[in-house]
Amino acid sequence: MARKGSVQREASGVKRERAELRPAGPRPSASRLPVLGLTMGDPAGIGPEVIVKALAGKTVHRFCRPLVIGSHPVMEKTVRSLGLPMRVMKHADLQQTFPKAGQIAVLDPLENPLGPFKMGEAAERTGAASIAYVKTGVELALAGSIGGIVTAPINKEGMNLAGFHYPGHTELLADLTASAEVGMMIVGGPLKIMFTTTHVAIRNLPGMLTTDRIVKAIRLAHRGLREYFGIAQPKIGVAALNPHAGEHGLFGDEEQMKIQPAVDLARASGLDVSDPLPADTLFGKAARGAFDGVVAMYHDQGLIPLKLVAFGTCVNVTVGLPIIRTSVDHGTAYDIAGKGTADPGSLLEAIKLASRLARLRDGAAKSAVKRQA
């Protein structure tokens, strides 16, 4: 958990004038694509590289108007190191004309340019900067200045070195938006998986699995499948924790004592939910269409099948926020940072999904206004 009030303080000298940015006025029809803030993530990781590669072609510009929220000097250096014929432009005002393919608009929220750092290493400086980028993106999204955010990876160690004690993006975003109930859903190929727990040690897992926590994950899975994927009555498969779903208590009793009671409560509220099913067969059934989504009990239980069927193209969606947020399915990849070998596939998919969700939300808002008129 973060220290109380830790995200309320200014991170690494964030400029206060960013909150004055307001949505642009009416635009020509060709410019009505949503503005998405692409937060750069940890400057010492592969975030800057995958952003530059994603923006190098014309694909992203067909879906949205991208605004990179990060370090202008780092983005310039990344373009040079990749040898791409692209121009990095400072973008301090959302009223400006957005760049076309081959140009990168960068909003740098730091009061002073980011100081020197070493690629592939966690540090307080880069950790604080990565939080500043996320915080700026959230503020702009909450103000309606941008349609949503797509986040490049942050480093948990660097974030904690900077004094922000969160296990990951999800908890940070919940705090920044004062959201009471959020969850991590990752989609890839035929699978859509909500996670009951995320970044926790396996030895601590049984104690963290409570009926309330599992009910919350089921509820968020239902909400995400309805709101983001238009499934009116989603059918949700629930993974067991133990082999063979515990075999009636022979291999553990979490299914009987915690998971089944959560399923019963979810069903009582009208949700279509399975009994706890053995994970070794559940994900295959979901991939073949038996379930619209799956609730996994822990990180690797859900990520292994996801990355098996859709490695490099999975997308993380935070369900329960008042803003749209998607993200890549990978970390900072310090081992390849700065080597020019990072794959932008997951970021491209995250941008496409965020663009679609932003258009859906905008359309829903306009329809609501018409109904009230």
Image (tube, rainbow, N blue to C red):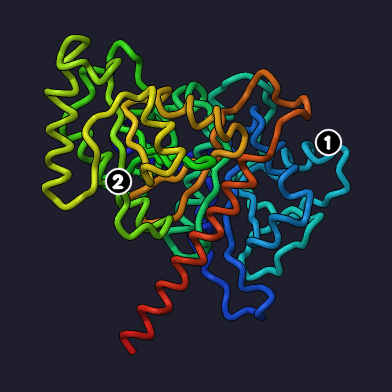
Q: From mark 2 to mark 1, how far is it between C-alphas?
A: 40 Å
Question: Circle 1 — which element?
Answer: helix
Q: Is residue 109 visible?
A: no
Residue drawn 77% across and 57% down? 58
Asked if the residue under mark 1 is in contact with the one under mark 2, i.e. CB atoms within 8 Å, the reply is no
Residue type at mark 1: give it.
Leu
| Place of residue 139 in the rendered image (x, y in percent of width and height, measured from the top left) | 45, 54
183 or 332, nearer to the observer: 183
284 relative to 265, above or below? above
Residue drawn 30% across and 49% down? 222
Instruction: Kindly indicate the quadrant of the structure image that contains residue 2.
Output: top left
206 relative to 275, above or below? above
Q: Earlier in the sequence, mark 2 or mark 1?
A: 1
Question: Circle 2 — which element?
Answer: helix
| Place of residue 69 in the rendered image (x, y in percent of width and height, measured from the top left) | 60, 48
| Place of residue 30 in the rendered image (x, y in percent of width and height, measured from the top left) | 69, 75
211 or 20, nearer to the observer: 211
Q: From the viewer's perspective, is 315 left or right of 244?
A: right
Q: From the viewer's perspective, is 234 left or right of 105?
A: left
| Foreground tag (2 vs 1) | 2
Residue drawn 35% across and 20% down? 200
169 or 327, nearer to the observer: 327
Would you call the spot at circle 1 few (<14 residues within 10 Å), some (14-19), or many (20 or more)?
some
Q: Quadrant of the C terminus?
A: bottom left
Instruction: Kindly indicate the quadrant of the structure image that contains residue 256.
Output: top left
Residue drawn 60% across and 47% down? 349
| Outermost residue to the bottom | 373
Q: Quadrant of the N terminus?
A: top left
Residue 220: mark: 2
Residue 82: mark: 1
Residue type at mark 2: give it.
Leu
